[in-house]
Amino acid sequence: MSEIKKIGVFTSGGDAPGMNACIRAVVRTAVFYGVEVVGIRRGYQGMLESDFWDMDARSVGNIIHLGGTILKTARCTEFMTDEGTEKAYNNLKEYGIDALVAIGGDGTARGAERLSNRFKIPTICIPGTIDNDLYGSDFTLGYDTATNTVIEAIDKIRDTAASHNRLFFIEVMGRDSGCIALRSGIAGGAEAVLLPERATGVDELISKLSVDAKNKKTSSIVIVAEGDKSGGAYQLAEHVKEKFNFYDIKVTILGHLQRGGSPSSFDRVLASRLGFAAVKELLNGKTRQMIGLRGNSIVLTPLEEALNASHFKLEDDLMEMVSVLSI
Amino acid sequence: MSEIKKIGVFTSGGDAPGMNACIRAVVRTAVFYGVEVVGIRRGYQGMLESDFWDMDARSVGNIIHLGGTILKTARCTEFMTDEGTEKAYNNLKEYGIDALVAIGGDGTARGAERLSNRFKIPTICIPGTIDNDLYGSDFTLGYDTATNTVIEAIDKIRDTAASHNRLFFIEVMGRDSGCIALRSGIAGGAEAVLLPERATGVDELISKLSVDAKNKKTSSIVIVAEGDKSGGAYQLAEHVKEKFNFYDIKVTILGHLQRGGSPSSFDRVLASRLGFAAVKELLNGKTRQMIGLRGNSIVLTPLEEALNASHFKLEDDLMEMVSVLSI
Amino acid sequence: MSEIKKIGVFTSGGDAPGMNACIRAVVRTAVFYGVEVVGIRRGYQGMLESDFWDMDARSVGNIIHLGGTILKTARCTEFMTDEGTEKAYNNLKEYGIDALVAIGGDGTARGAERLSNRFKIPTICIPGTIDNDLYGSDFTLGYDTATNTVIEAIDKIRDTAASHNRLFFIEVMGRDSGCIALRSGIAGGAEAVLLPERATGVDELISKLSVDAKNKKTSSIVIVAEGDKSGGAYQLAEHVKEKFNFYDIKVTILGHLQRGGSPSSFDRVLASRLGFAAVKELLNGKTRQMIGLRGNSIVLTPLEEALNASHFKLEDDLMEMVSVLSI
Amino acid sequence: MSEIKKIGVFTSGGDAPGMNACIRAVVRTAVFYGVEVVGIRRGYQGMLESDFWDMDARSVGNIIHLGGTILKTARCTEFMTDEGTEKAYNNLKEYGIDALVAIGGDGTARGAERLSNRFKIPTICIPGTIDNDLYGSDFTLGYDTATNTVIEAIDKIRDTAASHNRLFFIEVMGRDSGCIALRSGIAGGAEAVLLPERATGVDELISKLSVDAKNKKTSSIVIVAEGDKSGGAYQLAEHVKEKFNFYDIKVTILGHLQRGGSPSSFDRVLASRLGFAAVKELLNGKTRQMIGLRGNSIVLTPLEEALNASHFKLEDDLMEMVSVLSI
């Protein structure tokens, strides 16, 4: 067993549903094993300001179902300077925090790598981002919830779509990653999905929609990731409008509602398992690892490897399915 | 009792949650009283094309909970010509339809008024539109569901808002009516609501948000009706951005998802009551009436009166509450 | 304007969705008008223990959408003794609380009447109970949310019902009041609704179900209020099982999940309006009133009158509709 | 490529959310590859009655989001006789159906194995059951949706639980499998989970609840699988009541609402992938396989192997987590 006496836990970067369930798991597992646990508010910013919270089992009561993060989050540039990193470490040291669990996305993991590399503080990262764009886990916290949020929107639009000749463009999150767009497009039964990872020309889209119209589809739904190269949903709608004057074209921009909401069962279980395992692995002497779920197993990936790997995760069969299943 | 033998029922204009529950009530009440009932598909367009469906009690099984309308809907300009109206009436007559229940918004009621005025076919209108902009009923079908849809979106955004210094603009439906914006703004706890009925200058909004910032509100949500005079949510966001550089400003355009979704309990009960009463009133000899709910009572308003009345429905206390309750 | 300087607000009895939205409205309206406001935790029990919380506008931030009550609730018998009432009053007086807003059901209102009658402390009651069994308001806080919760359950059961020959009994809340059962039965499209207010014999139920079976209904849903005289859902299922061996009979007991959940748009607006108006009326010198919504108007009813009136609220048309609309 | 010309698809046994999404994927993939596809209504019963439906791409429009199964389902004993199996096969042959996709649980797979073993008709099984009790796939269709349904119920109960000293027993589905109970217990933050796979004595439960009470938990939620050996939730409540008179004990029996509801994003993607792959594998000459998802890969398991394997699937870490995370 390790010498770890006080674990610091924090969330950083964009918040994601499931972060609270994960904090709960970290805190209660630490308490269960007789280790102290400190919540660091607002991520790296909170480290720089010693914004610490001594937590116990009751601190995380009744939060498993809440979206957002009770530890708040922030983006912090000062930490990324050498002075910033040192100041953060000194604050941790002064408070007796001798190990870290970092919950967040790519930027969070880079910060954790920086800190643990330079100051050798045992650190485990938990992938928490709705974009599912991290290497080391099949799923990141919040991704399942976000796709459920998107399909609820699609379902509602489908109700009204079925009564009219209409073409709907729905813009979803994903600046660099088409994961949300692709999975929710499949699950929502969309006619087309436009992703940052793949250039779909406007011509290709128009051609697909023309075939659908010939096949007597009376309405169509197109999912557009915000990072798609052909411009956002509004711009696409403009392009397409010229060709399809028989369609009434409508646009929805889901925006930040995709980040919120009560986490799904899947995300809560994932969050609980990763938080639980992260503390156990720290106590087992592990450090500088990304912890994740592969299949049904908890796996560790060295942080350096995880950060350098491509996180391209679009399942091969899904892209093919978009066109086959929407005939 | 009347001589009515065959009632035609149709939905027209924009679809609204609760229309199916209403169709079900009309059909089953007619069947119960031994009257035939015919579904007219795609509103006035379907009248012109004799797109008729002989319905029975089983035709409306298992639809009470579905959004949209199984009778479809359409906008139809031909009907509004004298020839169109006559053709429609002749098709109805030929098929033996001797009374009508029309479900829809303002345009639907105008069409029904036109037809029943000219050809004396007994007609009752049921107010069905998410905008709540009809005279004759405290609530129109779909309005309650739409506001529930909007507050679910606001709640999700609130989760992420609480973790950051952020200002959110959420654009909701309502070209001429601020009903959805106002009620969902109150129910969502929004900091400000911008309506078509009232000019809120950008300056006034900025002033309110400045006070909030001083009062240590860390995030704010502004609801903008699409018909607001200061431009849509995007344009407002641009204006405000210049003044609030400490806020991260985000925009959501809910669009047509507000039209869909399973109707709320309130809308289903309302739809059932109005559909049930509409048939009974027709059989009692009533015609050219808008049927509605006032308080807990079913009331009739002559169509002509309903169409000429102002449908300005913003409850006095609500507008005042927006600013008082968001301090 | 009155001399009121410090308002106490509390929730008591069974909790109901919308109580938090109401507390928020009371607190912020008081603050807006420059009056102090104190939260009394756990209702009358908290009065006896001086469990007081000085609240400000920020105390009620981010709670409008939460079920339950941040002021907690309790049932308290000691308060109903003469000594208890006096002790409670002395605690209020000592803390400077010179007016009360009481949120709760029948028992809460009786307690408030007792206190304000004996000690002349200005008091307004807000009807908060999912049962809708109070006189003075068309709707009580939580009722709309509860019926939405019930119909979501019915809708899910309907999915599976449609695939099998099945008869479902769903037991809902309502020991003395059939309001939840009736409205959710209508909105859920139930084949029968059994209420405490009306004796439906098992024979009558069996006869209705037999007719449905002849009419080729393949599945049926029966809503049973817990206070129904023929026994709960399980007992009914037993009785019916003997007659319908071709049906697979299933029972669901919804229980306390009907008390929870995020309040609906309707309940949040109602809660906000009543809380806002309650404070204004107190400041206008009103006391010993039940405040409620009738139609679209806020109305006051003297507490004594409200408590003595029959609160039988089943809308006449609804009971008739249950059988007509489920043919 | 195979000689397959006409694929029959059916659902059988208990229905599960995602079955419609799966039927859609099977039908459209077949159409895409130029193969005819026939829906067999009510499973094996429909085979015996030649209840066939020639489907095309439009037959499965607008169903991806619906619970239940448009092909209906039934339990059928006649098929399990030698004569029944032969009659079913002859009906299939006569209609030209030369391959099968069977969607359902254990009994469905046994029937498919029986038919394909005896008559060599190419057959792929897709695991569809909310219980997750089949070998060959990490997840079965409907399981994710069912656990989401359960946690929504738990969340609502938690709202009211937090206001009172209360102990809640929630009975969930699972006669032989504790999968739903365990995952929803973890995701719902339950204090204890009682499963058929493991005997938890009433004494053990009482001891855990006593510790919680000492740790100042003010309310507790216990999840009971219907197949738990200590009796259902009501019986447990009775036993526990004697020991905990300071708790108000409440029971909820979720029942068949767990089978319904719109499938989750996860279930729709799973259903689409398995349906898509099933047709491709049939066309590739595969037969008598259970198709499933392991990790992120589609895998085939010979039917015989799948049916003989233990389907005990409780993840090791989850059981341990129940007690650690609810301290």
Image (cartoon, coloured by chain):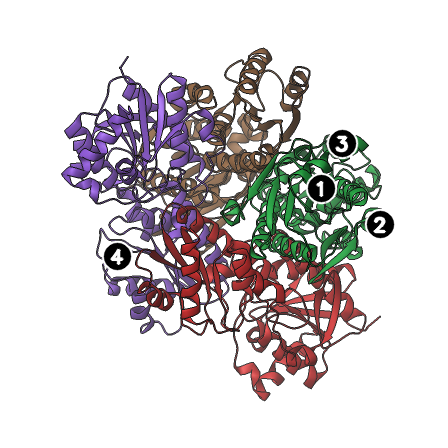
Chain colours: A green, B brown, C purple, D red
Nearest the viewer among A48 and A258 is: A48
Label 3 vs label 1, nearer the camera: 3
Q: Position of residue B162 (x, y in %)?
A: 57, 33
User: Which three-letter amino acid code belongs to the residue tagged 1?
Assistant: Val
Residue position for label 3: A84
User: Which three-letter amino acid code belongs to the residue tagged 3?
Assistant: Gly
Determine the chain carrying the residue at label 1: A
Label 3 vs label 2, nearer the camera: 3
Q: Position of residue B276 (x, y in %)?
A: 35, 43
Discs 1 and 2 lie in a common subunit: yes
Residue C228 numbered mark, or none: 4
The alpha-carbon separation of the residues under discs 1 and 2 comes to 30 Å
Viewed as shown, does residue D188 lie left or right of C310?
Answer: right
Residue position for label 2: A309
Nearest the viewer among D52 and A146 is: A146
Say whether residue A132 is visible: yes
Viewed as shown, does residue B302 lie left or right of B9?
Answer: left
The alpha-carbon separation of the residues under discs 4 and 1 comes to 50 Å
Viewed as shown, does residue A312 lie left or right of B97?
Answer: right
Q: Secondary structure at mark 4?
A: loop
The alpha-carbon separation of the residues under discs 4 and 3 comes to 68 Å
Label 1 vs label 2, nearer the camera: 2
Label 4 vs label 1, nearer the camera: 4
Discs 3 and 1 lie in a common subunit: yes
Determine the chain carrying the residue at label 2: A
Nearest the viewer among B244 and A41 is: A41
Residue position for label 1: A222
The alpha-carbon separation of the residues under discs 3 and 1 comes to 45 Å
